[in-house]
């Protein structure tokens, strides 16, 4: 029964997000909103809709562990699992803008999230600050993309087709699609949260760990599908951009909106402060040296990401089932993670320097 509740909720979430984004996008296009604006707002945030729904529902229910665990866990899952899997399928290309702007911004926002949560909670005004930063980021993207509208229109056409604005479909159909999508989102997040809480109780695992693993992976399925399909089709820059963009929206939109909606803000546990948020920062920082080397993610680097994620999940499960005395080893685990990051950076930069010394034919 619990499995059916989880799967039913997850299915409703994914389908609801897709229908809602399609319906709202078509209505916006009918109203004359340029595809550029739609692509950078509705479509870009659409893949984060499941995370938003789950975290907001968790915040409303007073389950901060699921709300914050979903956002933090999704960011770790997106980089280590999705990019790792996509890179194993085919080496991924990294656009220069990601290196110059988006990845540094992701790192800064990750550090800011840790700073805001350092006192054990993210207050409503702090969530409002994150939302404001998200609006500024979107406005900046719109301004940048406006300089190359043809590129933005092409990317939008890949999702919804170039004929979107000329389709003569009834307004009613688009409104119904949007309404059905929103309804499925609401129902799906309730079922999924209820199922996740029940699983946590049955396994005697904390709601935080469930949020960091099952919920985070489940709500990231749209990103998995988008990035893997893009990698298979050879659109390898889209696979990377989708993940980094989703992580930024998770920080400013998911955490921000959840904190604003929660009656007393989001409570952040000691484990998240001392372990999971630092791991999220380490993962975000690891992207920069890897992306800088040849502007690509090689298969061996993707494999490293995947193995790192499996170790992280295994650690969460073992720690949650272990004796309380085991909790003191978090600091050791974090030190090991940072050391591995340093080794990875050294290896990657060393390989890059070796490539640079090899004369081109």
Image (tube, rainbow, N blue to C red):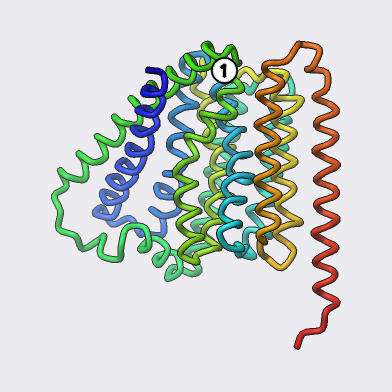
Task: Specify whether 271 is left or right of 4.
Answer: right
Nearer to the camera, 325 or 138 = 325
Residue 153: where, in percent of width, then height?
A: 39, 65
Residue 211: name its quadrant.
Answer: top right
**Residue 141 higher or lower than 184, as above or below:** below
Residue 196: where, in percent of width, then height?
A: 48, 20
Residue 233: where, in percent of width, then height?
A: 46, 64
Nearer to the camera, 23 or 228 = 228
Task: Specify whether 230 is left or right of 137.
Answer: left
Residue 60: where, in percent of width, then height?
A: 46, 17
The quadrant of the rendering that contains the N terminus is top left
Instruction: Sort mark 1 into few (<14), some (14-19) or many (20+) by Cα contacts within 10 Å.
Output: many
Nearer to the camera, 142 or 46 = 46
Label 1 residue SS: helix
Q: How many marks?
A: 1
Task: Specify whether 288 is left or right of 7.
Answer: right
The residue located at (78%, 17%) in the rendering is: 327
- Find the residue positioned furthest to the bottom: 361
The quadrant of the rendering that contains the C terminus is bottom right
Residue 295: name its quadrant.
Answer: bottom right
Per the image, the residue denoted by label 1 is 207
């Amino acid at each position: 029964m619990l499995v059916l509740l989880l799967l039913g909720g997850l299915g409703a979430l994914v389908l609801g997000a897709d229908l809602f984004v399609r319906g709202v996008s078509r209505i916006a296009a009918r109203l004359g909103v340029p595809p550029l604006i739609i692509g950078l707002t509705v479509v870009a945030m659409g893949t984060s809709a499941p995370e938003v729904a789950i975290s907001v529902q968790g915040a409303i229910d007073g389950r901060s562990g699921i709300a914050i665990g979903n956002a933090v866990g999704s960011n770790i899952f997106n980089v280590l699992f999705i990019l790792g899997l996509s890179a194993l399928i085919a080496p991924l290309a990294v656009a220069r803008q990601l290196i110059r702007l988006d990845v540094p911004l992701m790192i800064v926002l990750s550090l800011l999230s840790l700073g805001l949560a350092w006192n054990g909670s993210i207050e409503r005004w702090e969530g409002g600050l994150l939302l404001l930063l998200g609006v500024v980021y979107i406005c900046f993207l719109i301004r940048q993309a406006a300089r190359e509208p043809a590129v933005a229109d092409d990317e939008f056409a890949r999702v919804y087709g170039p004929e979107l604005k000329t389709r003569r479909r009834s307004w009613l159909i688009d409104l119904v699609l949007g309404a059905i999508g929103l309804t499925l989102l609401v129902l799906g997040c309730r079922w999924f949260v209820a199922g996740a809480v029940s699983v946590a109780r049955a396994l005697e695992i904390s709601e935080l760990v469930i949020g960091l693993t099952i919920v985070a992976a489940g709500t990231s399925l749209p990103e998995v599908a988008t990035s893997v399909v893009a990698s298979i089709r050879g659109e390898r820059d889209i696979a990377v951009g989708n993940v980094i963009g989703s992580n930024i929206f998770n920080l400013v939109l998911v955490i921000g909106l959840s904190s604003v909606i929660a009656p007393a803000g989001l409570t952040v546990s000691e484990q998240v402060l001392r372990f999971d948020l630092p791991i999220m920062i380490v993962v975000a920082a690891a992207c920069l040296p890897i992306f800088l080397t040849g502007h690509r993610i090689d298969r061996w680097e993707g494999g490293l990401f995947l193995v790192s994620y499996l170790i992280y999940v295994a650690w969460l499960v073992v720690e949650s089932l272990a004796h309380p005395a085991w909790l003191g080893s978090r600091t050791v685990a974090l030190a090991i993670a940072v050391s591995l990051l340093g080794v990875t950076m050294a290896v990657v930069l060393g390989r890059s320097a070796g490539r640079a010394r090899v004369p081109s034919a």
